[in-house]
Amino acid sequence: MGKAKLFLNSISNMFDVALKEMQVETGLAKQIKSCNSTHTIRFGVKLKKGIQVFTGWRAVHSEHLEPVKGGIRYSREINASEIEAMAALMTLKNAVIDVPFGGSKGGLKIDPTKYDDDDLEKITRRFTEELAKRGLISPSLNVPAPDMGTSKREMGWIADEYKRLNPHDINAFACVTGKPENMGGVDGRTEATGRGIFYALASFFDSNDKKKTGIQGDLKSQRIIVEGLGKVGYFAARALQDHGSTIIGVIEKDISFYNENGLDIDLIREWLSNSNKTDDYENQNELLQRNQVFSKECDIFIPAAMEGTINELNQGDLNTKIICEGANGPISSQADKLLNQRNIVIIPDLYANAGGVAVSYFEWVRNLSHMRFGRMEKRRKEYENASLINLIESTTGTRVPDRKKSLLSEGRSELDLVRSGLEDMMTEAYESMSYLWNKESYPNLRVTAYIYSIKKLIDSYKSIGI
C-alpha cells in the first residue's frame, strides 16, 4: 500500500475510533468522514523549455462552515488520497481551535526546486486561474495558505493573479493567507505553526494532565528532539529554546545532529540553507545518522517533517515520554495504538499543528476589515502606560529605569497582538480538550481531540437540517 493511502487509512481509522466512542448514527458518521468533493486539475504552461502539463488537486472535506480553509502543497510525492486526508484533518483542526472555517487542502505535483523563479511564477498563476474557474479560490468560499513547498512568495503570486481576475473585488487579497506583509499578510504568520507547538506544550505543562500522565519537571527542564527543521520545526525549536528548553537532537532526511548539552539551532538552519555539505559543518562531533538520533533518549519528540515518519516498524525505537505532532499525520494509526500501549503521551496534530490556521484566520479577518491590528488603540495604550509610570514614580519616589520605561511605554506591535491571540486560542482549546478528557475518561488526547471536534461538526450539521 502506498504512503498516501496509508495516511488516508490512518485518518479514517482514527475517525472510526472516535465515532465508535461517541456512538454516532451510521449515516451521520458517513457524512462526517466523507470528503465532499475532490477536483483534479490538469493544465499546460508554456515554459522556457516548452509546454509542460501539470496535475493539481483541491479537496473540500466539509462545507459546514464557509469559507473552507487549507494549504497548497508543492511536491512530487502528493496525490489525491493524501490531499483528501489532509482536508479531513483541516476540518478537525479548524473545529478544535474554534475558527469558523470548513476544511480543504490543495496540492500541485511538482518539484519546485527544478524551476527558476520566472517559470514557477507562471505555473503558480496558471494554477490560480484554474482554481478560480472552478470556484476553488475565493475570500468567501475557499481560502488557501502556504504548505510544504510553498511560502509567502507563492501566496503573493496567487493573490495578485486572483486580484487581476477579479479587479472589482475589494476583498480580493483575502482569497489567500500567508501573503507578504505589503499585500495584507500579518507579521507572525510564517512562525505561527511552529510557535503554536510551543503554546500546545506550554498548555500541557500548565495543566493537571502533566501530573495525570506522570510527566516530571516543567517545560524548561525538557530535553527535546525535533524531526525536520523546516518552517514548522525551526520555529518550534526556536520558541522552545528561547523559553529555556534544550534541543538535543535534530533529524533531517540525509543527516542528523545530536548534542546532549544542546544544539545551536540557528547554526544548523544556516548550514542547511547555505551549504548542506557535511564537511562544511563546524561541529563535526554532532553529526550522526537518522536512526541514531531517532532512538536517543529524550523527554519530548517533535515530528515536524512529513506524514507517516513514525510507523509500527520504528515506533519501538523511540525513547521519549511525549510526542507533540508538528507535521500532519506523522504517526500511523497502528503506531499510535502501540505508542499508547507504551504510555507515551501524544499531543495530536489536529491540535498541536493548528497554529498556522489560527493566524491565517487573523490575516483573513484583517484583510476583510482593511485595517491593521492595533490601529485604534496603540497610542491610547502608550498614553495609559506613560500615565501609570508617572503615578508609580510620584507615589513611590523612585525612578523607573529608562529601559523598562521604554518597554512599558510602547504600544503593542502587530506581532505582539498576533502572538497573544495565538496563545489565547491554543490555551483555550487545550483547556477545553483537557476538561473533556478528564470528565469522560477517554483513552487519550487524540481520541479526545477528535471527539471534541466532531461534536462541533454534529452541532453544525444539525443546525442546517442534516
Image: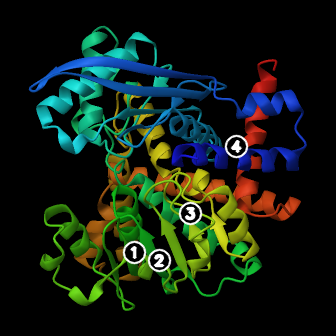
Q: Are marks 2 and 1 in contact (CB under 8 Å)?
A: yes
Mark 3 lies on a secondary structure that is: helix
Per the model, the C-alpha gap separating discs 2 and 3 is 22 Å
Q: Is residue 242 visible?
A: no
Mark 2 lies on a secondary structure that is: helix
| First along the sequence among labels 1 and 3 | 3
Per the model, the C-alpha gap separating discs 2 and 1 is 6 Å
Per the image, the residue denoted by label 1 is: 290
The label on residue 12 is 4
Report the residue that reaches farthest toward the left: 48
Residue beneath the point at 75% across and 55% down? 447
The label on residue 294 is 2
Q: Is residue 259 visible?
A: yes
Per the image, the residue denoted by label 3 is: 200
Q: Going by the image, does 444 lie left or right of 150?
A: right
Per the model, the C-alpha gap separating discs 2 and 4 is 27 Å
Mark 4 lies on a secondary structure that is: helix
Per the model, the C-alpha gap separating discs 1 and 3 is 26 Å
| First along the sequence among labels 4 and 1 | 4
